[in-house]
Amino acid sequence: MSGWWLLWDPACDKMVQSASVIFPCFQLMGKSNPGKSKGSLGHILNTAVLWKVPTERYFEEENGAIEMLPLTVNLAIPEHLGQALSGRFWEEWKAACMCELDKMLEKNVWEAVTKTKDMTTIGNQWVFDIKHQVNGNVKKFKACFVARGDH
């Protein structure tokens, strides 16, 4: 099928492929009806034959190639917790942080104690990453809580 468009959909945060696209700036122009008469450009393009092969075959191959493209955008990975929780995907990052904390509590990674004057606290930070599926789609948002080794 001919006439496919590859467009960015901000609501889904990914590229989408569509044959029916409306460009608002062209809606103001007078409407014509291409493709009705045999001499029209629309009719010629829709029935064209290249090297004895109908153009529809080429469009099918192009559409197949387009479908194989990873339709994702590289998302920015936050450098610190404040950046993660103030960005567009703050809910996903918060859920990833809570999952990490739940795992640490479940495994008894630490024990909460009251700090005394003779104790030295160890610095910590959150490290973020995005895991992807083979096709490039986001699989999950990952957060790791780590102790800093610069104390």
Image (cartoon, rainbow, N blue to C red):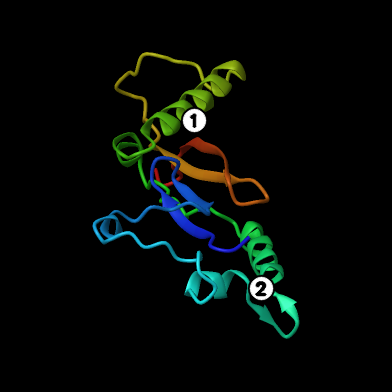
Q: Which residue is mark 1?
A: 96
* Residue that extends furthest to the left in the rendered view of this protein: 28
Residue at the image point whose x is 46% and y is 42% from the top: 127
Q: Report how far apart the C-alphas of labels 2 and 1 lie in the structure.
A: 49 Å
Kindly state the secondary structure of the residue where label 2 is placed.
helix
Which corner quadrant holds the N terminus? bottom right
Residue 16, above or below 34: above
Residue 147 position within the rendered picture, expressed as x and y whole percent measured from the top left: 46, 37
Q: Residue furthest right?
A: 52
Residue 55 numbered tag: 2
Q: Quadrant of residue 107?
A: top right
Q: Which residue occupies 42% across, 62% down?
A: 33
Front residue of 132 and 24: 24
Q: Earlier in the sequence, mark 2 or mark 1?
A: 2
Residue 126 quadrant: top left
Q: Quick one: label 1, few (<14), some, or many (20+) residues within 10 Å? A: some
